[in-house]
Amino acid sequence: MVRRPLGNHHDGPDTPLVTSDATQTELVAARSEKPAEELTRLIRNVRVVLWDFDGPICRVFASRSAQTVTDGLVGWLESRGLRGVLTEVERNSPDPQVVLRSVDRRHPCSDLVFALEERLSSEELRAVETAMPTAYADILIQTWRARGVHLAVTTNNSPRAVRAYLDVRGLTHCFAPHIYGRTQDLHRLKPDPHCLNRALNAIGAASDTTLMIGDSPSDLEAARRAGVSFLGYAGNGRNAKLLTAAGAAYVVASLQPLLEVLRQW
């Protein structure tokens, strides 16, 4: 399989712009006709689609940065005299889940971890009120579901936040009851395939007719371990490079070409 980004990389109101760190080769490859053929082969026999949430469906921290949430979690720990539970690198991570997972590694299944997870879930619930929908995600979800394909959310985010967002967008019926998010068993977050396997077992899906759409190397690893196909979504060149470096065979910078392929059937 060819390891390169697929899709339309152009500036416009509905299509993510590939930033300047994307290479010219990636841009040329994305404008060729071959990507549509590759996408067709990838999704032709798909009967189940597992969606990561933050990225492929929406940008959760669109108006309130993830760094702000991280800072809040770190501040909460420090107010309890627990500054030393994190390294300096972990305290400065832009990803709040790094804080959560780091504390869990050192104090697994503790009241401290459960309280920290609840705080992060509350922050995610606040964030989805102003989350930015990923271009073409809503219509792609609706189109796939109308064609009889089963959909599930498999995410490291709070399932409560996922449901709250889907309710607002009128998309809950496309997924319910198959929303599998973070639990207090934090060692089972992706790249562990636990949430993917929960979805597969609940739906009764065969792994060889299942596709996962994710935006990170941990999504790719979870898909590999669950034995399902993978499509990377990368809204910028940096994420595209991370996914291709991790071995993703298919990466799109926009969901539009995927929708176009479905509409041709």
Image (cartoon, rainbow, N blue to C red):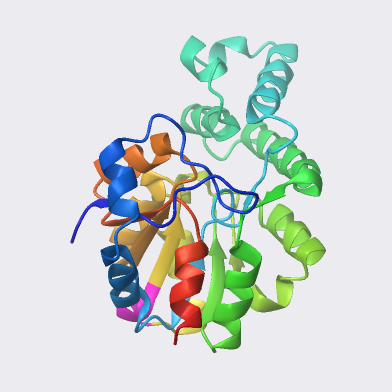
Q: Is residue 209 magenta?
A: yes
Question: Is 138 above or below relative to 237?
Answer: below
Q: Which residues are magenta?
A: 206-210
Drawn side of residue 158 relative to residue 40, left or right? right
Drawn side of residue 159 relative to residue 258, left or right? right
Q: Position of residue 22 (x, y in %)?
A: 36, 35
Residue at image position (75%, 38%) is: 123
Question: Is 235 above or below relative to 159?
Answer: above
Residue at image position (26%, 56%) is: 249
- The part of the image, by quadrant, that contains residue 152 is bottom right
Q: Position of residue 112 (x, y in %)?
A: 66, 31
- The part of the image, by quadrant, that contains residue 179 is bottom right
Q: Position of residue 157 (x, y in %)?
A: 61, 49
Q: Is residue 88 visible?
A: yes
Q: Main secondary structure of the magenta part?
A: helix
Q: Quadrant of the N terminus?
A: bottom left
* Count of numbered badges drawn on the protein: 0
Question: Is 160 above or below relative to 98?
Answer: below
Choose between 64 and 75: the one closer to the eye: 64
Q: Is residue 198 visible?
A: no
Question: Is 86 above or below relative to 46?
Answer: above
Choose between 23 and 66: the one closer to the eye: 23
Residue at image position (48%, 73%) is: 260
Q: Position of residue 247 (x, y in %)?
A: 24, 48
